[in-house]
C-alpha cells in the first residue's frame, strides 16, 4: 500500500470539548474511518497535527494526549485569531480535517533511566501533558519527575483538575506558580525561573523539557545553566507560523533547520542562536 498523502486531511468529528482556562479549550476529535484512526493513532509526545475547518483554513497544534490515554485525539487550543476562534465556536458533532502526525517527538526512549524536569508555561503546558502521561504509563523507566507549571494568572493555568493525579504519581513533585499575586491565590507567586532556581533540581543524570514562548525557553535555559545543566540536557519545543507542515514551503525555518521537519522538538544546543535573536 502506498504511503498516505501528508497534505490530505482525514475527516474527523468533534466528539467533546472542555474548558481548560480563559479562552483555552480542550477538543476531542475522533477520525471517522476506523482504519484511518488506527493509522493516525501512533503519535508520540511532542508531535503535532494540523486541524482544519471548512471555509476557515487550518492551523498546527501539539497533541495534548497520548493514544493510550483515550481513544480520541486531544488538542488544547488558545483562541487567538481567525482559525482558532472558529474552532472555539464549533458545536459537538462538527466535521473537521486532521492532518498528521507531524514533526519529531521528545526522545522519550533516549532519556529512560534519567530524572526528568518538565517546565510548562501557559498553553505551552499542553504538549507536555503527553510527556507526563507517557512517564505515568512507563513509570519504572524514568527517575524522579519534577513538574514546574506556570501561567500569568490563575485563570490561565491549564489542566488544573489533573494536578492531584500527577502529584500522586510515584517519585514525583509539582510546583505551580503564577507571575503576579491574584485575589484568592494562595500558591507560589513569581516567574517559573524564580521557582526553578529556588527548588534547584540537580542536573546529575537529568534532562529538562521546556515548552512555552521563546522568551521563556531562553530564560529557563539560563536558569538551568546556572543550576549546572548543559544545553545537551535541555529539550524544548518551538513554534512558528507554518503552511505545509512537511518541510516543503520553507516558512518555518530556524537557520538551516525547519521547525516542522527537524522539530518542533530541539536540544537547546541546536536553537541557542535562534532564542537569542527572538529576544
Ligand atoms: C508545532 C506547533 C504547535 C502548536 N501547538 C499549539 C497548541 O497546542 N495550542 C495552541 O493553542 N496553539 C498552538 N500552536 C499555535 C497555533 O498554531 C496558532 O495559535 C494558530 O495557528 C493561530 O491561528 P489563528 O488563525 O487563530 O490566528 P491568526 O489569526 O493567524 O493570528 C492571531 C495571532 O496569533 C499569532 N500567531 C499565529 N500563529 C502563531 C504561531 N504559530 N506562533 C506564534 N504566534 C502565532 C499571530 O501573529 C497573531 O498575532 C502551535 C503552533 C505550532 C507551530
Ligand atoms: S511549514 Fe512548510 S517547511 Fe515548515
Image (cartoon, rainbow, N blue to C red):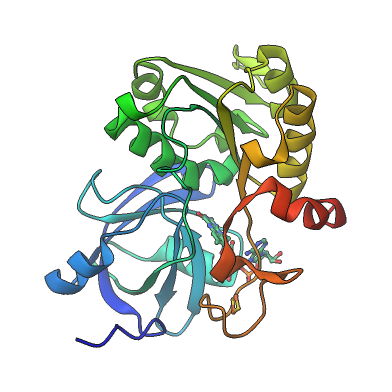
Q: How many marks?
A: 0
Nearer to us in this view, 244 or 88: 244
Quarter of the render that holds ligand 2:
bottom right
Nearer to us in this view, 167 or 172: 172
Which quadrant of the view contains residue 109?
A: top left
Nearer to us in this view, 223 or 88: 223
Q: Estimate the x, y position of residue 34 in percent, counting from the top left.
A: 13, 69
For residue 39, say whether it is visible: yes
Which quadrant of the view contains residue 120?
A: top right
Q: Estimate the x, y position of residue 94 in percent, counting from the top left.
A: 28, 70
Above or below, 261 relative to 65: below
Q: Estimate the x, y position of residue 224 in percent, counting from the top left.
A: 72, 29
For residue 191, say whether it is visible: no
Above or below, 80 relative to 17: below
Q: Residue at x 25, y 60 (%)?
A: 41
Above or below, 79 relative to 39: above
Nearer to us in this view, 242 or 277: 277
Q: Quadrant of the N terminus?
A: bottom left
Q: Residue at x 85, y 51 (%)?
A: 276
Q: Residue at x 31, y 24 (%)?
A: 140
Q: Estimate the x, y position of residue 106 in percent, counting from the top left.
A: 48, 48
**Is residue 104 toward the left or the right of residue 82 in the image?**
left
**Is residue 214 toward the left or the right of residue 47 in the image?**
right
Q: Residue at x 28, y 34 (%)?
A: 137
Amino acid at each position: 500500500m502506498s504511503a498516505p498523502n501528508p497534505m490530505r486531511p482525514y475527516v474527523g468529528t468533534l466528539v467533546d470539548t472542555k474548558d481548560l482556562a480563559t479562552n483555552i479549550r480542550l477538543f476531542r476529535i475522533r477520525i471517522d474511518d476506523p482504519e484511518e484512526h488506527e493509522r493516525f493513532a501512533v503519535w508520540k509526545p511532542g508531535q503535532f497535527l494540523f486541524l482544519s475547518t471548512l471555509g476557515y483554513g487550518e492551523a498546527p497544534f501539539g497533541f495534548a494526549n497520548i493514544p493510550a490515554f483515550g481513544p480520541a485525539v486531544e488538542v488544547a487550543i488558545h483562541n487567538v485569531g481567525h482559525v482558532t476562534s472558529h474552532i472555539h465556536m464549533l458545536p459537538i458533532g462538527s466535521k473537521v480535517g486532521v492532518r498528521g502526525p507531524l514533526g519529531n517527538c521528545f526522545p522519550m526512549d533516549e532519556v529512560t533511566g534519567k530524572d526528568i524536569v518538565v517546565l510548562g508555561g501557559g498553553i505551552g503546558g499542553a504538549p507536555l501533558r503527553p510527556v507526563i502521561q507517557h512517564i505515568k504509563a512507563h513509570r519504572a523507566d524514568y527517575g524522579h519527575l519534577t513538574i514546574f507549571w506556570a501561567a500569568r494568572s490563575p485563570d490561565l493555568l491549564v489542566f488544573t483538575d489533573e494536578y492531584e493525579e500527577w502529584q500522586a504519581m510515584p517519585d514525583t513533585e509539582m510546583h505551580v506558580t503564577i507571575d503576579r499575586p491574584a485575589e484568592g491565590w494562595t500558591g507560589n507567586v513569581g516567574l517559573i525561573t524564580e521557582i526553578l532556581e529556588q527548588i534547584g533540581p540537580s542536573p546529575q543524570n537529568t534532562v529538562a523539557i521546556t515548552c512555552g514562548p521563546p522568551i521563556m525557553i531562553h530564560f529557563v535555559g539560563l536558569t538551568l545553566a546556572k543550576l549546572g545543566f548543559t544545553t545537551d540536557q535541555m529539550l524544548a519545543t518551538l513554534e512558528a507560523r507554518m503552511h505545509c507542515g512537511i518541510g516543503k514551503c520553507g516558512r518555518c525555518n530556524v537557520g538551516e533547520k525547519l521547525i516542522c521537519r527537524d522539530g518542533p522538538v530541539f536540544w537547546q544546543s541546536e536553537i541557542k542562536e535562534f532564542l537569542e535573536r527572538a529576544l
